[in-house]
Structure formats: structure tokens, C-alpha cells
Amino acid sequence: AQAGRDIPCYGTTHADYIYGSIPCVRNLTKEELDEAFLKLYYKLKNSIDILESYGRNIVKLLMDDEKEKELMMLDKELHNLKAEKLRLLKENLEGKISDIEKISNLNEIQMYKSLYELEKKKVLNQVYESAEYRNNQRLVDVLRHSASIDTFDEVIFHEIVQKVMIGQNHIYFQLHNDLMIKSERKKYDGNYS
């Protein structure tokens, strides 16, 4: 394959799966890669909303029932603290509790509120700090903040593309968020150079 030649049949295992030689994929030219990347770049740049939706779906997939229940419980506790705070303020205005009692109770409420918010942040960080979500978000950020390009940009290429696979008729770009995008290759004109 490195010599640019087809691999001939050397045994029965090969013959069981393929009739004849395994065709060598023609070399990828710099122009072909540049053109395919620019098409990919603009396809992605015009589809940022789809990538953001993909990111939201990643969050939904990573948010298991246990985490969702924990978040609901924490939200309920935060709601209860807010209601308790309003009740205390009302009782203080009505003269049922002193300013000292109000301040003491409000400080306790604030302490619990901080603890619940910290717990909530820990649960959400487990999801939003996952490699899957971060890689997708990084891709969205690169696309959103990069200027339009009309020639190959190596920095943007490496920020977006994890690896390139070449087939006889297609170029496959695996993005950093693990999505695979296929680009059609130009038809072979009989010249490998």
C-alpha cells in the first residue's frame, strides 16, 4: 500500500473475503484535503445550532436517573428555603419575631442554601465536565469565534479534526466530539501524482 500498489491475493483467507487484489487507495493531495476541509468547516459553521443541540443531548444521556433525582431534591430544598425566608421576613414585619431572631434564622437559611447550591454544582459538573460535553463545546466555541476562512487554516483544522481517514471515494473527518463527517473525493483521473 505504501508503494501505491494493489495488494495481490496471497492466500485462502484473502480469497474468502475479496475476489482479486485489494485496491490501493490513491494518495490524497494537499489541494484535495484543503478543499474537503473548507467544505467541512463551512458545513459545521452553518450548523452550530445542530452541534449545540448535540451537546444538550450529551447532557441528557449523561444525566442518569440518580443524578436527576438528586437535582430535583436539591431544587425542592432550595425552594423550601426561599419560602422559609419569605415566612421569616413576613413574621418580622408583623412583629412576631425580633430582628435578632430574623438575622440568625436568615444566616442559617443562607448557610443551607450555599450547601445545597454547592451540591447541585457538583452534580452538574459531573455532566458538564465530561470529556464528551467539553469536546463538543470546544468545537462549538472554535466555530463560533473563528473568522471566516477561504484557505486551509492548520490551527483551526487541528482544533476541529481529531483524525482523517481516506477511502477510495471519500475522506472521513473524525471530529474531536467523535462525530464522523464524510466528504466525497474527486474521481480518480488515472494519475497518482
Image (cartoon, grey):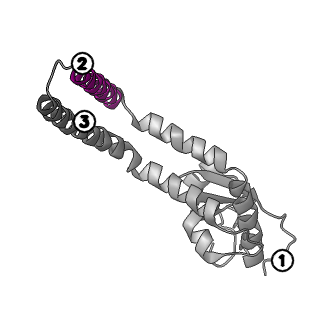
Circle 2: residue type: Glu
Q: Earlier in the sequence, mark 1 or mark 3?
A: 3
Q: Is residue 84 magenta?
A: yes
Circle 3: residue type: Lys
Above/below status of 153 relative to 180: below
- Helix, strand or loop for disc 3: helix
The residues tagged by marks 2 and 3 sit, at their Cα atoms, a distance apart of 25 Å
Q: Specify few, some or many for label 3: CA neighbours under 10 Å numbering under 14, 14-19, or 20 or more.
A: some
Toward which corner of the image does residue 50 lie, by quadrant? top right
Above/below status of 70 relative to 59: above
Where in the figure is residue 175, as x and y percent of width and height? Answer: 57, 58
Q: Which residue carries the number 2 mark?
A: 94
Which disc, if any, is residue 55? none
Circle 1: residue type: Asn
Q: Nearer the viewer, residue 138 or 14?
A: 138
Q: Earlier in the sequence, mark 2 or mark 1?
A: 2
Q: Specify few, some or many for label 1: CA neighbours under 10 Å numbering under 14, 14-19, or 20 or more.
A: few
Q: Is residue 16 left or right of residue 182?
A: left
- Helix, strand or loop for disc 1: loop
Q: Is residue 146 magenta?
A: no
